[in-house]
Image (cartoon, rainbow, N blue to C red):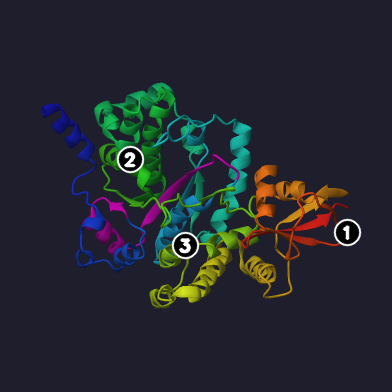
Amino acid sequence: MPERNEAAAQAAFVYEKTVLLAAQPLRTFMNALLTTLTRRGFIHQCTQTDGVTDAFRSGIVPVYAGFDATADSLHVGHLLPIMLLRRLQRAGHKPIVLIGGGTTRIGDPSFRSDSRPMLTDAQIATNIAGIRGVFERFLAFGDGATDAILVNNADWLDRLGYIDMLRDVGPHFSVNRMLSFDSVKSRLERQESLSFLEFNYMILQAYDFLELNRRYGCRLQIGGADQWGNIVSGIDLVRRMAGEEVFGLTAPLLTTASGAKMGKTAAGAVWLNGDRLSPYDYWQFWRNSEDRDVGRFLRLFTDLDEADIVHLESLEGADINAAKTVLADEATRLAHGEDARMRAAEAAAGAFGDGESLNGLPVIEVSGSVTVVDLLVQAGLVSSKSEARRLIANRGARLDDEVVEDEGAVITVNDPLKLSAGRKKHVLIRARE
């Protein structure tokens, strides 16, 4: 089987001494930071573990994570690298947030079955403006040695000459090795189209690492597990063109305990911007976590100490709801601030009958009279009229906590009303002025 062995050897090549942290006992890590990150679940793979350990010991390490501007808000699926940057900054290192103003024009093909939609320059600019503020809630920006900085790779990618890029960077990439990475190979094995444009994404991301190393002394790139091939390509390029030793670290791609993709719900993505998803709905997302996920999410998405988390995850039965409330409070405080957290918690208390306030519930404005079936659809609590009728038939729809009995009921909104679907989905209905 010589061909398979050769392909396996190419796929295994990432960089000398690359290791999977999960395969090694924690006692092998002499650096307390890596030990803590591993225990809290942040680390999936790491290159040159000894080198990363030495770098962390030697002083401030500039570390970057990249985010393409494919939408005007980030979502919960982006939180893991953001929280990892936060952890590293709190440990005395320097975060570099890279916005992919240039690479967004191509779109990362990693583990996708189709090409990303092409965005115009105006759309990309709008998206960058929308996501920029997210990072300021999690990281401290400024001019200090460990203050975070935000850069846009369009600043250098837009100025690259194609011939110069081919001549200077192209010789350092083996097409054979690029084809061996799982992110590319899986798509080709499924006989799904991979355009030449998308194939270049790995080269551009590798060039980002080189440019950040030259400009800011960046020594570590972090990303999701699906970025492994792109990251190690950048490490190799920096070694070849700059003669510098740099490192990569990936976080696991998270799913819930039941196997669902993290950050996706039936209603769509769980956005980090309040204008895309209300702080109340964000709070409810975390409050509705599965029991088995509470301890893991507390370690990854809050700043709570390990001892507090151990206590919270030990709760059983109905008491686990107290731990879920702490998770929702802490996650919402980080993403939206304390005022929004308080309003969301008060709204939840009111929605569940434990308080008087309904401030913070998503608000739907209606004009005139509307059937309760149409109202459920307009409020986004159900996806269709037939689903609304089934909900009413099963006594799952309520107005101001009163069960809706008649699917033909017509509602005229004068005073604000709380409309509920089941026990966890609520909106505030009010008349349009």
Residue 290 marker: 3
Whether residues under marks 1 and 2 lie with C-beta atoms below 8 angstroms apart, the answer is no
Amino acid type, label 2: Gly
Residue at disc 1, secondary structure: loop
Identify the magenta region. Answer: 44-72
Magenta stretch: residue 246 in it? no
Does 175 sit left or right of 67 as displayed?
left
Residue 121 appears at what percent x and percent y? 60, 32
The mark that comes first in sequence, 2 or 3, is 2
Numbered circle sitting on residue 414 = 1
Q: Which residue occupies the foreground of this view, 93 or 159?
A: 93
Closer-to-camera residue (413/340): 413
Residue count near mark 2 (Cα–Cα under 10 Å), binned few <14, some 14–19, many ≥20: many
Membership of 66 in magenta stretch: yes
Locate residue 305: give its quadrant: bottom left
Spatial CA distance of label 2 from label 3 is 37 Å
Q: Is residue 260 left or right of residue 412?
A: left
| Of pointers 1 and 3, the one earlier in the residue sequence | 3
The residue that disc 2 covers is 234
First-in-chain label (1 vs 2): 2
Q: Residue at x 25, y 56 (%)?
A: 21
**Nearest-to-viewer mark from 2 and 3:** 3
* Amino acid on which the number 3 mark rests in the picture: Glu
